[in-house]
Image: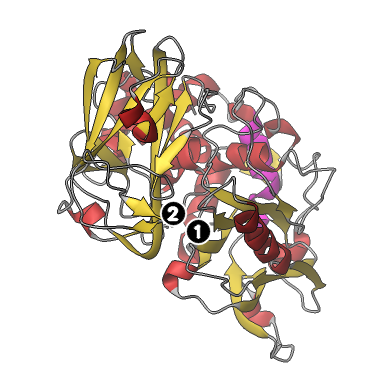
Amino acid sequence: MRLSQVTFALAGCAIQMANSSPCIPPPLEATAFALTYGYPIRQYSLLVKSYLGSTGPNVGLKRRAFYPANTTEPAIRVNVDTLYITGYVDLSSDNVIFTYPEPKDDRFYSFTYFDLYGNNIATLASSLDSTPGKYMLRPRDGECNDKSAQDESVQGYINSPTTYGFFAYRFWIKDKNNATELDLVHAMQDESTITPVPRTWHSFANAAPALTNETLKETLGSTYSPSGILNVLARISATNPPIEASDWARVNSKLSAAGLSNGIYTPPADVDLSAADSLADALVASALASPRGQRDLGNGWEVAFPETAGNFSTDYEARSYLAQRLYGLLTPDVALYPAYVRDTVGDNQNLVVGAGEAYLLTFSGRPPLAEKGFWSITAYDENQYLIPNGIDVQSLGSASNMTYPDGEPIYRNGREYGPDGQFQILLQPAGLYPPANWTSNWLPVTPGGGEFTVTLRWYAPHEALMDGSYEYPIFTKISAITP
């Protein structure tokens, strides 16, 4: 599923199909559904492939330092605001106990568990005043089948709809060059333990194959493969059902009609897999263009599928679309990721500047956030990697030493400081240095000009960032500002 190759000629048929038209043969429609439904498996495979055969499941990998700005990064759109603990989960034999640590100060930090398909099943966050302690992750049938005595040391249970999943702890870093700051976060990382616990009761997850390279082999390659997704989906779907249990019978019927049965994918006769893939793309594109697909935030900023983002229920088109762009995104009450779509080019929504050009990004005022929230805007090159530059700045936001036009600080120690008011960020090519009064508000972009993209992240956002009452920042292309 690659929206850059959508066959829009099928979109009309897709709409008719939704109204029970015979326009599309049922096996073709079922195969398109299976590709839409199963697409997150590709993203999951790419996410966990570096862990398979090394750390194994149910183990946390601690990121103690930030990745350097170069093209050897292991992931695109790297977040330079937070340090992580990440890993993948296999509940085929064990439950897992996660420790959510005690706060050390007023920083934002969180723990999130996602199912295989990218649904945000549970989030503990300082912005939500979540209770520190131990939490047990188990298959969701544990609500009925777990007859063991309540573990009094456990604060609560997280019931996973899927056998496989992944998790992420996030810790906001206010100053990545401050050793004391890093020591504090490292201590919180060390207190965030992950402990597998052998399961003493029988679950649907017991029938799942152990999660290995062999289990995901057809989706571990660098090239997108529709048949690969269908083969892996056939193998694991029975033990990784949809988040809505009431939709399982319908989903299973669709998958069966697409040739997925008893762990094996057998392509139906006369189904052109390329046509099915194009139809899947058209269905997702149609959903994106529908009223539920986008919310206009103003000034060229939008958020996709705002009602279901992060917890998709039965909106498999939204799930597929966001898996391609923000797999593992948090729900909007915890974090919001607006996209700038005006005057952009390509699938990555890139902006373009010439060698002597720049963009001014004008904020109406400080973004409204909850008490422990923070925000940032990060620049990436055309391939979505961080941009090396002489001042080692890849991101600006509430942790930065930005100033208002009169030189007064906007934030101090990561928190609001002084009166609110309009301020600007200069997006100008790396190496093209602005005057000294712009340095603290300069976010370097592609050296010599060219394409770049930005990611705006609001953590613990206020409702004003979604309901239209906050005026979103305005991009203006200008001649580069130089001494």
Q: Against 270, is 321 above or below? A: below
| Pointer 2 local density, CA inside 10 Å: few below 14, some 14–19, many at least 20 | many
Q: Amino acid at mark 1?
A: Asn
**Residue 400 placement (x, y as % from top left):** 42, 45
Per the model, the C-alpha gap separating discs 2 and 1 is 5 Å
Residue at 33%, 31% (x, y): give it. 285
Quadrant that contains the C terminus: top left
Q: Please say if the residues under marks 2 and 1 sit with CB atoms less than 8 Å apart.
A: yes
**Residue 451 placement (x, y as % from top left):** 40, 16
Q: Amino acid at mark 2?
A: Gly
Whether residue 17 can be seen here: no
Q: Which labelled disc corresponds to residue 336?
A: none
Whether residue 47 can be seen here: yes
**Residue 245 placement (x, y as % from top left):** 51, 65
How many numbered circles does the render carry? 2
Q: Quadrant of residue 298?
A: top left
Instruction: Give the magenta-colored segment's residue range.
Output: 228-241
Query: Observer-nearest residue: 361 or 483?
Result: 483
Residue at 64%, 54% (x, y): give it. 182
Q: Which labelled disc corresponds to residue 120?
A: 1
> Is residue 136 found left or right of 93 in the rendered image?
left
N-terminal-most mark, 2 or 1 = 1
Q: Is residue 233 magenta?
A: yes
Q: Is residue 205 magenta?
A: no
Which residue is identified by label 2? 310
Q: Secondary structure at mark 1?
A: strand
